[in-house]
Image (cartoon, rainbow, N blue to C red):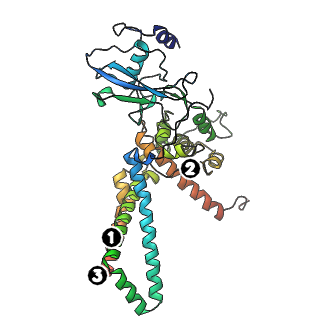
C-alpha cells in the first residue's frame, strides 16, 4: 500500500530519478509497451496507451509496467506481489498469451512492441486488474479443504500418508490460483457458470487425497452440468499453467471417477447393503 | 469489489487465436468424417442383407474414385483422431508404480499404440491369410 502511494504521488518524473523499489534501467535502447487502459469513472470503453520503456534484457514485463507506474504514469493500475512466480497475482495477457508477467522477459519480445491486457474471460475492474469474485466463488464451491469428522481430533496423532498416496495428487496441489487457465479456456469464455480448470483440479486434488472423506460432498458439485462435464478437453489450460498442474488431466481423471461412481450406483445402490 | 466491471466483447473467432484451439477444432471435426463412414458402413451391412446382387452393385459404386477418395479422407481423420486420443491417455489415465508415474510416452505405448498396432496386425494377418 505504501508503494501504491509512493508511485501515485510521484506522478510524471524524469527517467533519471530512482523511486524506491523500482527497477533500474541500464540500457540506452527502449521498447514500446501498449497497455490496456480502462478507468470506469471516466472511460466508457477501454483504450490502449503506448509507453516507451528502457530496454533491459534482465527485465520482465512486470518490471516494465512497474517502471511506467513509478516514472511515467502513476495512474496505471495492475496487480502484483512476489515477483518470483509464487503468488500468482501478476497474470496478464501479453501479446495475446496468458502469462505471469514476472516470468515473461522483455528479451522474448524485443524489438517489437509488447501489448499487455488484463486476463480475458474476466470482467475488468480497472486497467490491468480483473475481478476475481466469480473465480473465488467457483473455488469455494468445490470445498477445497480437508473434509472429515475427526479433522480437529489430534489425539491419534497426525493423519499419515505414504509417498505413493501423496504422489496421486501432489501435482494438483501446486496451483497458485493465477487464473491463467481460465483465460486460456474457451469454455470459460462461452459459459460464465462453468466451474473452470483450477477449481475442478483443486476439487480433484482433495478427492484424490487419502486423508479426505469429502468426495461425495464435492462430487455433488463437480458432477453438475456446469462442472466437469462442461469441459471439452481443449487442453490449453495445461499448456499455459506456469506450475505444470495439468488441470485438463485432473478434469479427465475426475470424469473417469464420476463415471465409475455413476455405474457403481447402479450395481450397489445406496442402502442396498444395509 | 463487485463482479461487475467492463466485459469485453465475445470472441467469435476464438478458435483462430491459438494453434491449440485450432488443433482442438480439427480433432472435433474428425468426428464428422467418422460419423459419415459409419453411415456408409451401415448401408453396406444393409446391402449384404439384401442379397449378393445388391451387395455387388454397392461395392461397384464404392469403387468409384469419389468414394475411394472419401474413404481415404475418413481413414486419415480416424488415424488423426486416434493419435489425439492416445496423446490424451497419459493425462486422463495416469499409471502409478508406487510413487513413480509412468512417463507419457511409455503410457501411450502401453495403453494406446501397442494394443492398436497389435489388433491392426491381427486384422491384416486375418485378411491376408
Measured Cα–Cα span from mark 2 to mark 1? 35 Å
Which secondary structure lies at badge 2? Answer: helix
Quickly name the residue at label 1: B72
The chain that hosts pointer 3 is B
Question: Is B61 left or right of A88, judged from the image as shown?
Answer: left
Q: Is residue A53 above or below residue B92?
A: above
Query: In the orientation shown, which residue stands out farthest toward the front?
Result: A44
Q: Residue at x 60, y 39 (%)?
A: A138
Q: Quadrant of residue A29?
A: top left
| Quadrant in the picture for residue A94 | top left
Q: Nearer the viewer, mark 2 or mark 3?
A: 2
Q: CA distance from mark 3 to mark 1?
A: 20 Å
Q: Is residue A104 visible?
A: no
Q: Specify which label sits upstream in the sequence, 3 or 1.
A: 1
Whether marks 2 and 3 lie on the same chain: no
How packed is label 3: few (under 14 Cα within 10 Å), some, or many (20 or more)?
A: few
Q: Is residue A243 left or right of residue A25?
A: right
Tag 1 secondary structure: helix
Q: Which residue is mark 3?
A: B128
**Disc 1: host chain:** B
Question: Of tags 2 and 1, which is closer to the observer?
Answer: 1
Q: x%, y% of residue A9?
A: 49, 8
Q: Nearer the viewer, residue A31 or B106?
A: A31
Q: Residue A159 appears at what percent x and percent y?
A: 58, 38
Tell me, yes or no, whether the two marked residues, 2 and 1, touch with CB atoms within 8 Å: no
Q: CA distance from mark 2 to mark 3?
A: 45 Å
- The answer for which chain carries disc 2 is A
| Label 3–label 1 contact, CB within 8 A | no
**Residue A228, label in figure:** 2
Within-10-Å neighbours for mark 2: few <14, some 14–19, many 20+: many
Amino acid at each position: 500500500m505504501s508503494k501504491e502511494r509512493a508511485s501515485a504521488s510521484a506522478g510524471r518524473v524524469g527517467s533519471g530519478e530512482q523511486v524506491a523499489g523500482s527497477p533500474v534501467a541500464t540500457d540506452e535502447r527502449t521498447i514500446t509497451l501498449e497497455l490496456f487502459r480502462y478507468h470506469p469513472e471516466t472511460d466508457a470503453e477501454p483504450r490502449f496507451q503506448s509507453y516507451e520503456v528502457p530496454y533491459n534484457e534482465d527485465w520482465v514485463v512486470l518490471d516494465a509496467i512497474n517502471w511506467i507506474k513509478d516514472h511515467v504514469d502513476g495512474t496505471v493500475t495492475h496487480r502484483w506481489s512476489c515477483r518470483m512466480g509464487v503468488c500468482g497475482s501478476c497474470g496478464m495477457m501479453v501479446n495475446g498469451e496468458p502469462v505471469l508477467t514476472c516470468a515473461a522477459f522483455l528479451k522474448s519480445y524485443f524489438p517489437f512492441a509488447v501489448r499487455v491486457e488484463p486476463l480475458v474471460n474476466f470482467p475488468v475492474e480497472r486497467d490491468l486488474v480483473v475481478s476475481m469474485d466469480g473465480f473465488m466463488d467457483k473455488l469455494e464451491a468445490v470445498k477445497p479443504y480437508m473434509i472429515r469428522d475427526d479433522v480437529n481430533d489430534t489425539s491419534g496423532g497426525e493423519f499419515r500418508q505414504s509417498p505413493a498416496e501423496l504422489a496421486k495428487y501432489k501435482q494438483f496441489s501446486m496451483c497458485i490460483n493465477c487464473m491463467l487457465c481460465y483465460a486460456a479456456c474457451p469454455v470459460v469464455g462461452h459459459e460464465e457458470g462453468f466451474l473452470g480448470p483450477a477449481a475442478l483440479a483443486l476439487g480433484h486434488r482433495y478427492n484424490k487425497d487419502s486423508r479426505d472423506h469429502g468426495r461425495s460432498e464435492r462430487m455433488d458439485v463437480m458432477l453438475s452440468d456446469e462442472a466437469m462435464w462442461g469441459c471439452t478437453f481443449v487442453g490449453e489450460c495445461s499448456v499455459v499453467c506456469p506450475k505444470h498442474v495439468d488441470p485438463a488431466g485432473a478434469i479427465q481423471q475426475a470424469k473417469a471417477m464420476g463415471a465409475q461412481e455413476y455405474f457403481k450406483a447402479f450395481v450397489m445402490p445406496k442402502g442396498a447393503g444395509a | 469489489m463487485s463482479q461487475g466491471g467492463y466485459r469485453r466483447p465475445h470472441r467469435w473467432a476464438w478458435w483462430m487465436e491459438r494453434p491449440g484451439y485450432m488443433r482442438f477444432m480439427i480433432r472435433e471435426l474428425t468426428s464428422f468424417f467418422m460419423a459419415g463412414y459409419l453411415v456408409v458402413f451401415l448401408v453396406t451391412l444393409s446391402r449384404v442383407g439384401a442379397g449378393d446382387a445388391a451387395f455387388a452393385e454397392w461395392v461397384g459404386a464404392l469403387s468409384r474414385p469419389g468414394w475411394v477418395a472419401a474413404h481415404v479422407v475418413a481413414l486419415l481423420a480416424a488415424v488423426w483422431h486416434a493419435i489425439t486420443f492416445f496423446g490424451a491417455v497419459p493425462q486422463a489415465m495416469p499409471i502409478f508404480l508406487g510413487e513413480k508415474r509412468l512417463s507419457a510416452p511409455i503410457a501411450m505405448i502401453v495403453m494406446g499404440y501397442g494394443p492398436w498396432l497389435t489388433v491392426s496386425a491381427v486384422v491384416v494377418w486375418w485378411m491376408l491369410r
